[in-house]
Amino acid sequence: MDERDGMTVQVGETQTFLMDRGAGAPTLLLHGSPDSSHMWRPLIEALPSGRRYIAPDLPGYGLSTAPEDFDYSLESQTKWVDGLVAALEIETPVNLVVHDFGGPFGLAWAATYPEKVRRIVIFNTNFFSDYHWHSWAQMMRAPIVGEAMMAINSEKVFTQTIAKTAPRLPAEHIAETFRLYTPAVRRHILRLYRATDPKNFRGWENKLRAAIARTPTMVLWGDQDPFIEPRYAEKFGAERVEHFQEYSHWLPVEAPQEIARRLDEFFQEA
């Protein structure tokens, strides 16, 4: 991915890079960490035309820039998503698709502005106060230790680690993710991990469930995920939950054709 593959819009303090494809009902896709909007490319290419697909790089990730002291609180994440929707002049409810850290960004926004969301699709993410960080995250959240981890995370180490975590993940995806894994991105990754304490979701969980109760929601979960247990898929209170036992954390990248069929059917429902 490069600058010729998308556009940049000003959203608050951030210069936000995004892919904006097609026309029609808007679908907003929010990636996780350490990814970028690139992760959605195979899925978007597998989805039919007739809709507008918008995939931004989160603040400080990919080709998006953000101040070094960017506020990653849930309130700030909500404000950023709402600012993005306003900057793109989207006036109709969106189909919201979230993965990993894109979950808190998008779901906090959906909980705050449920009237702006038509349907929700959730992939492997957390929005619950009883979650316990996995060992990698615990190290990244620790001062000095996290910086040391980033410093020694060479392309070889990065590639081997991700491939071991998700054997079905395409090598091209891992290579592109590392290409955008710049020193600035690594610093923002640490800031986001350190700002994301599960206890921060207290009070937000019920707001989200209330929004989901009025919004058709589908959860698709890769059960081989070593970061978030499959039991969390049911906690959102969605009307539809499907587990994929053979896939890992990056389900929409690991099985784009299969997932595209699920999304297309879901979005077509009245």
Image (tube, rainbow, N blue to C red):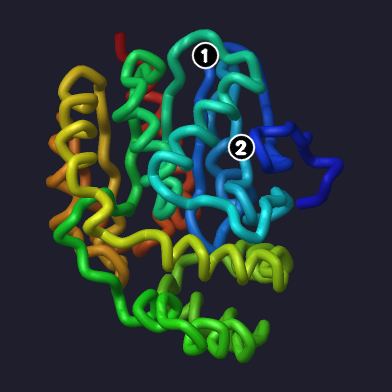
Element at label 1? strand
Q: Rounded to the nearest whole Å, what is the CA distance between mark 1 and mark 2? A: 16 Å
Number of numbered discs on residues: 2
Q: Position of residue 116 (x, y in %)?
A: 40, 16
Left or right: 8 in relation to 140: right
Q: Disc 1, disc 2: CB below 8 Å?
A: no
Q: In percent of the image, x 35 and y 47: which residue is there?
A: 123
Query: Dot 1 surroundings within 10 Å: few (below 14), some, or many (20 or more)?
Result: some
Front one among 12 and 219: 12
Residue 98, quarter of picture: top left
Q: Position of residue 205 (x, y in %)?
A: 19, 41
Element at label 2? helix
- At label 1, the amino acid type is Ala
- At label 2, the amino acid type is Glu
Q: Give the labeled residue for mark 2.
A: 45
**Residue 232 visible at all:** yes
Q: Which mark is residue 25?
A: 1
- Which numbered disc, 1 or 2, marks the residue that appears first in the sequence? 1
Residue 61, quarter of picture: bottom right
Left or right: 68 in relation to 230: right
Q: Is residue 10 above or below residue 256?
A: above
Circle 1 or circle 2, nearest the eye = 1
Left or right: 64 in relation to 206: right
Front one among 232 and 77: 77
Q: Position of residue 29 (x, y in %)?
A: 51, 37
